[in-house]
Image (cartoon, grey):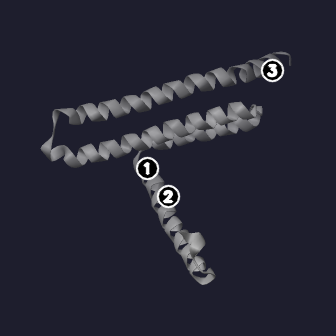
Amino acid sequence: MAENLPAGELRNYMLDEIRRFKHSLKHALDGIKYAISHEKNFRLELIFAFLIIVLIFIFKVKNWEAIILILMIMWVLVSELTNTVFERVVDILKPRIHPYARLIKDLMAAVVLISSIASIVVGLIIFYPYFRDLIVMISFY
């Protein structure tokens, strides 16, 4: 559609698209701010994410290992945000509580737990050789 517009209209179209994108980005950042200020687990996961990223640089892990670790971090954070969304939706429906309301919250918590455990296992597998080499190096001093 945009490619058929005259130059002046194309410029306006592009500026509108940029404004819409900025607006969408603001909403996304507002969601992250909410999660940081209201969700203790999200804050804790962000701390662990930061520590893992620091370890990636300290140990100079291989590129593919860094990519896997970053994807695992994102998986946990997205799971936590999804859990938060489901919890809020269930909380809205609470006055008309349904037997599945508690189950939905429990299942979403299980999603976060499974993603966290899987991420920890992957992190241990990737970082084990680096920590092993560090311990061997330290033991020689």
Residue neighbourhood size for the residue with mark 2, other residues' Cα within 10 Å, grouped as few (<14), some (14–19), many (≥20): few
Q: What's the residue at 28%, 34% (across, down)? A: 104
Q: Is residue 138 left or right of residue 7?
A: right
**Quarter of the image holding residue 12?**
bottom right
* Image location (x, y in percent) of residue 66: 69, 35
Q: How far apart, in angstroms, are the residues tagged by discs 2 and 3?
A: 43 Å
Position of 18 relative to 73 (above/below): below
Tell me the quadrant of the picture where the C terminus can be found: top right
Give amino acid for label 3: Ile
Q: Is residue 109 left or right of residue 128?
A: left
Q: Is residue 101 left or right of residue 63?
A: left
Residue neighbourhood size for the residue with mark 3, other residues' Cα within 10 Å, grouped as few (<14), some (14–19), many (≥20): few
* Image location (x, y in percent) of residue 101: 22, 36
SS at mark 3 in the image? helix
Reading the image, the residue beneath label 3 is: 138
Position of 102 relative to 91 (above/below): above
Q: What's the residue at 43%, 28% (across, down)? A: 113
Q: What's the residue at 57%, 77% (across, down)? A: 5
**Quarter of the image holding residue 50?**
top right
Foreground mark, 2 or 3? 2
